[in-house]
């Protein structure tokens, strides 16, 4: 049994109409899906990738006295927003001769801000009464590990830090 010319034309028009409808849906749908999922692939202001420049090396005393330094990401992205320079954290920098040490200011116990007690030569978490040696080791209190050491280098006379956060309340240093 053969089709009439009208039935063949109708089948062809259905096929062309379906293809056009599918193309129109894809033309609208793909950008919408890309817009919705884009923040998933963006770096947020929680951390910084790579090394972040901080202060000139001369700003860190040679006597081992800690200096609190801000980690400022130049133009971080947070979802769809391009933000102005933003402080994402702080570190303690210390040096003795050629050795440069960078320690996170976040207490590994519950994430409180650690302070330097210059008179006693220690770091102290005032929230839960934890003390840390200038090396970062726990000397007293409930913290499960010492202060987290961060990778530091000097480039062109500027101290650069690879800033990252670690899970709190764990014995092991695990990136957050």
Image (cartoon, grey):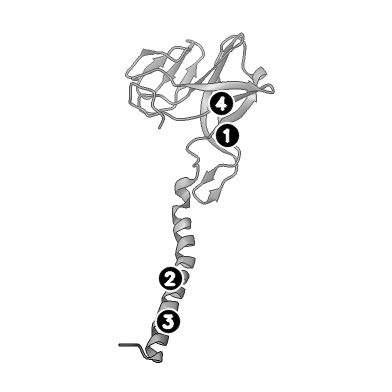
Query: Which residue is at the far left?
Result: 1
Mark closest to the chain's N terminus, 4 or 3: 3
Q: Which residue is mark 2?
A: 22
Mark closest to the chain's N terminus, 3 or 2: 3
Label 2 element class: helix
> Dot 4 surroundings within 10 Å: few (below 14), some, or many (20 or more)?
many
Mark closest to the chain's N terminus, 1 or 3: 3
Q: Which residue is mark 3?
A: 12
Where does the C terminus fall, quadrant-wise?
top left
Label 1 element class: strand
Q: Quadrant of residue 157?
A: top right
Disc 2 versus disc 1: nearer the observer:
2
Q: CA distance from mark 3 to mark 2?
A: 15 Å
Mark closest to the chain's N terminus, 2 or 1: 2
Q: CA distance from mark 4 to mark 3?
A: 65 Å
Q: CA distance from mark 2 to mark 1?
A: 47 Å
Mark closest to the chain's N terminus, 4 or 2: 2
List x then y, in percent, for residue 80: 52, 51
Q: CA distance from mark 1 to mark 3?
A: 62 Å
Mark closest to the chain's N terminus, 4 or 1: 1
Q: Which residue is mark 1?
A: 72
Label 4 element class: strand
Q: Quadrant of residue 21?
A: bottom left
Disc 1 versus disc 3: nearer the observer:
3
List x then y, in percent, for residue 168: 36, 28
CB under 8 Å between callouts 4 and 2? Answer: no
Q: Which residue is mark 4?
A: 161
CB under 8 Å between callouts 1 and 3? Answer: no
Residue 26, placed above or below residue 43: below
> Dot 3 surroundings within 10 Å: few (below 14), some, or many (20 or more)?
few
């Amino acid at each position: 049994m053969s089709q009439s010319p009208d039935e063949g034309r109708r089948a062809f028009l259905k096929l062309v109409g379906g293809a056009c409808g599918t193309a129109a849906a894809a033309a609208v749908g793909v950008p919408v899906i890309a817009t919705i999922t884009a923040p998933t692939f963006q770096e947020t202001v929680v951390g910084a990738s790579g090394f972040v420049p901080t202060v000139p090396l001369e700003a860190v005393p040679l006597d081992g006295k800690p200096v609190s330094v801000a980690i400022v990401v130049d133009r971080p992205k947070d979802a769809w927003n391009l933000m102005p320079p933003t402080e994402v954290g702080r570190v303690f920098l210390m040096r003795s001769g050629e050795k440069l040490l960078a320690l996170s200011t976040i207490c590994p116990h519950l994430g409180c801000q650690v302070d330097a007690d210059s008179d006693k030569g220690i770091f102290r978490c005032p929230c839960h009464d934890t003390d840390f040696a200038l090396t970062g080791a726990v000397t007293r209190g409930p913290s499960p590990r010492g202060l987290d050491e961060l990778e530091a280098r000097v480039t062109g006379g500027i101290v650069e830090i690879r800033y990252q956060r670690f899970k709190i309340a764990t014995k092991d240093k695990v990136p957050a």
